[in-house]
Amino acid sequence: MSPSPAASAAPRARLSRDRVVRGAVAFADANGIEPLTMRQLAEEVDAKPMSLYNHVANKEDLIDGMIDLVFSEIELPSAGVGWKDAMRQRAVAVRSALTRHRWAVGLMESRSAPGPATLRHHDAVIGCLRSAGFTMALTAHAYAALDSYIYGFALQERGLPFDKGVETSLLAHAFLAHFPAADFPHLAAFTVEHVLQPDYDFGAEYAFGLELMLDGLERAARAT
């Protein structure tokens, strides 16, 4: 006697907050966060919509968990390295996380009920700067300046109408065709002499700006 379909079907994985949050992150990675609803999430995790509320109170609680998961992927400042190296590593790791989770840009510092990974992250960054001799005021300035740069660059990068390579070249040529170069000579020269060069990569600007920021903070720390 062959088993019934119900008996042969694989059992559903047990629902948990972690599974719900990871399902939401997977959905947002693929589709963005705007279309994420509890009904869509239920389909993503193969559960009934009402069962989700046993693990998240509402969508805001869900987003809190999603952001905390992103923070958990960002390596904390390494012990035993200088603050500049630690902040550089952290800046690269944050940008990498936001590249994987583009929907999270603009949400990382928006939560009023941050999770444990979020709190550990902030505590570690502050601790790193304070251990390096930064005053509390300079620590606040440094954190604000670095995050404004990191998140601002990620937001700008997400909004660019091109990726790189051939796509950038095609868009730059189309851009040039929209305005007379004689009327905007500096913009035209920038496009031709910089953007249209074979090795152009807007993302490379991140490291340049980050070093300027770190050098400036180093000077400020020495002056205190």
Image (cartoon, rainbow, N blue to C red):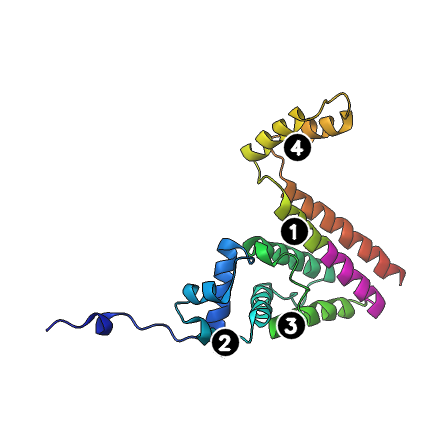
Residue 135, visible in the rendered structure = no
Say if the magenta span includes residue 21.
Answer: no
Instruction: Name the residue type under label 3.
Output: Pro
User: In the image, residue 102 lies at what x, y percent?
Assistant: 58, 54
Name the residue beneath numbered marker 1: 154
List the residue tagged with mark 3.
114
Neighbours of disc 1 within 10 Å: few (<14), some (14-19), many (20+): many
Amino acid on which disc 1 is placed: Ala
| 76 or 98, nearer to the observer | 98
Rounded to the nearest whole Å, what is the CA distance between mark 3 and mark 4? Answer: 40 Å
Task: Give the amino acid type for the residue marked by disc 4 in the picture.
Answer: Val
Q: Where is residue 158 shown, x and y percent of the image?
A: 62, 48
Q: Are marks 1 and 3 in contact (CB under 8 Å)?
A: no
Secondary structure of the residue carrying numbered label 3: loop
Report the Cα–Cα distance between label 1 and label 3.
21 Å
The label number, if any, that marks residue 53 in the structure image: 2
Q: Point out the tag, 3 or 4, that comes first from the N-terminus.
A: 3
Q: Residue drawn at (84%, 55%), measured in percent from left and top?
A: 219
10 Å crowding of disc 2: few (<14), some (14-19), many (20+): some
Front position among marks 3 and 4: 3
User: Is disc 1 placed on a helix, strand or loop?
Assistant: helix
State which tag comes first along the sequence, 1 or 4. 1
Q: Which numbered disc, 3 or 2, marks the residue that appears first in the sequence?
A: 2
Between marks 3 and 2 in the image, the one whose residue lies nearer the viewer? 2
For label 4, the residue is 195
Q: Which is more N-terminal, label 4 or label 2? A: 2
In the rendered structure, the answer to whether residue 160 lies left or right of residue 181 reads: left
Magenta-drawn segment: 134-148
